[in-house]
Image: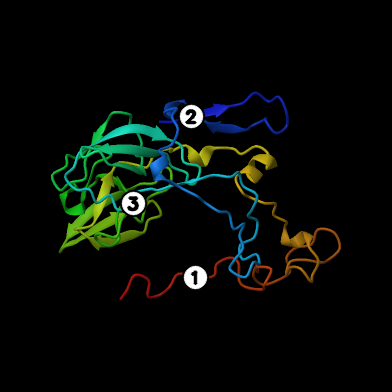
Amino acid sequence: MATIKKYKPTSPGRRGMTVNDFSVLDKKAPEKSLMAPMTSKSGRGSAGTITTRHRGGAVKRRFRIIDFKMNKIDIPARVESIEYDPNRSAFIALLVFADGEKRYVLATDGLKKDDSIIFSEKAPIRNGNRLPLRKIPLGTTICNFELFPGKGAQVARSAGSSAKLTALDAGYAHISLPSGVVKIVSEEAYATVGQVSNVNYNKIVIGKAGRARWMGKRPEVRGSAMNPCDHPHGGGEGCQPIGLKHPKTPWGKPALGYKTRRKKKNKK
C-alpha cells in the first residue's frame, strides 16, 4: 500500500502539501507497445468552443492501453511491474502471460511484482484473480466487475474502489456498492477479487494552484463574484446571498438537487 509523503513547510505552497510515496512502484519505463498518442482538447467540442469549463494546459502525456475486458481465460500471468499511470487515479500492473503477450490491467491493492494471477472459472479466491460472480463466495470484496457478461470491467475502477458480493439468486448476483446502491447483474459476469490500488488517493492535498494547472485544471470563479449578465448569482452590493429559489448554473439550469439519472437506464 502506498503511503502518503508530507513536505516540510518551506513555503506557503509546501505547507500541508502531500503526495503519494511512489517508492512502492517499479522504476522502469512504460511498455512502448502498450502506449498511444494522446491529444488534449482542453474541454472544447467539435465546434472549437468550450463545452466543459475549467480544463486545459495539462502536462503532455501518453495514453496507456488498459485491458478492461481481461479475456485471456485460463492463461496464467506474472506481474512484471506495478506502474504509475498519469491518466487515472489507480496504479496499473504490467502482466506477462504464459504465451508471451503483455497487457496492462488495473492493479489491486497489495499486488506486487512477480505475483501470479489468472482469469479463470477455476481460479482460487486470491487478490488480483478474476472469475465469474457465481464462483465467488458471498461477502468477498471485489472490483472491476462487469454489468453485462463479456463487456469488460465498468464499475469500481477508480483508486481505492471496491464492492461486496452480497447474494446470488436465480441467475443474478447482488453487488453492494459503498454508496448503498445494490447492482443486480448476471452471475456469469466476471469480477476481480480485491480492492483497486492507491487507496490513499482521496487524502492527497494538492497544496498550490500550480500543481492543479499541471493536472489540467484551470481556475474557477464563484458565480456570486460575477456580474448579473454573467451568472444568475451575480450582482448586488458587496457579498450578497444567492437570492434565488434554487442554485443555478451560468445558463440558468438547476445546479443542486436536480435529478439527472435516466429513468430507463440499463433497460432494453
Residue drawn at x 62%, y 70% is: 47
Three-letter residue code for mark 3: Phe
Local SS, label 1:
loop
Three-letter residue code for mark 2: Phe
Q: In which quadrant will I find the C terminus? A: bottom left
Give the color scheme: rainbow, by chain, secondary structure or one colour: rainbow
Closer to the chain start, of discs 3 and 2, is 2
Q: Which numbered mark, 2 or 1, is in the foreground of this view?
A: 2
Q: CA distance from mark 2 to mark 1?
A: 38 Å
267 versus 147 height, above or below: below
What residue is disc 1 on? 260
Q: Which numbered mark, 3 or 1, is in the foreground of this view?
A: 3
Closer to the chain start, of discs 2 and 1, is 2
What residue is disc 2 on? 22
Q: Position of residue 186 (x, y in %)?
A: 22, 62
138 sits left or right of 207 in the view: left
Local SS, label 2:
helix
Specify whether residue 111 is in view: no
Q: CA distance from mark 3 to mark 2?
A: 24 Å
Q: Position of residue 100 (x, y in %)?
A: 25, 38
Residue nearer the viewer, 199 or 80? 80
Q: Badge 2, how many Cα within 10 Å: few under 14, some, many 20+? A: some
Residue nearer the viewer, 91 or 19? 91
Three-letter residue code for mark 1: Thr
Q: Which numbered mark, 3 or 2, is in the foreground of this view?
A: 3
Tag of residue 68? 3
Q: Position of residue 205 (x, y in %)?
A: 59, 37
9 sits left or right of 178 in the view: right
Q: Badge 3, how many Cα within 10 Å: few under 14, some, many 20+? A: some
59 sits left or right of 136 in the view: right
Q: Position of residue 135 (x, y in %)?
A: 16, 49
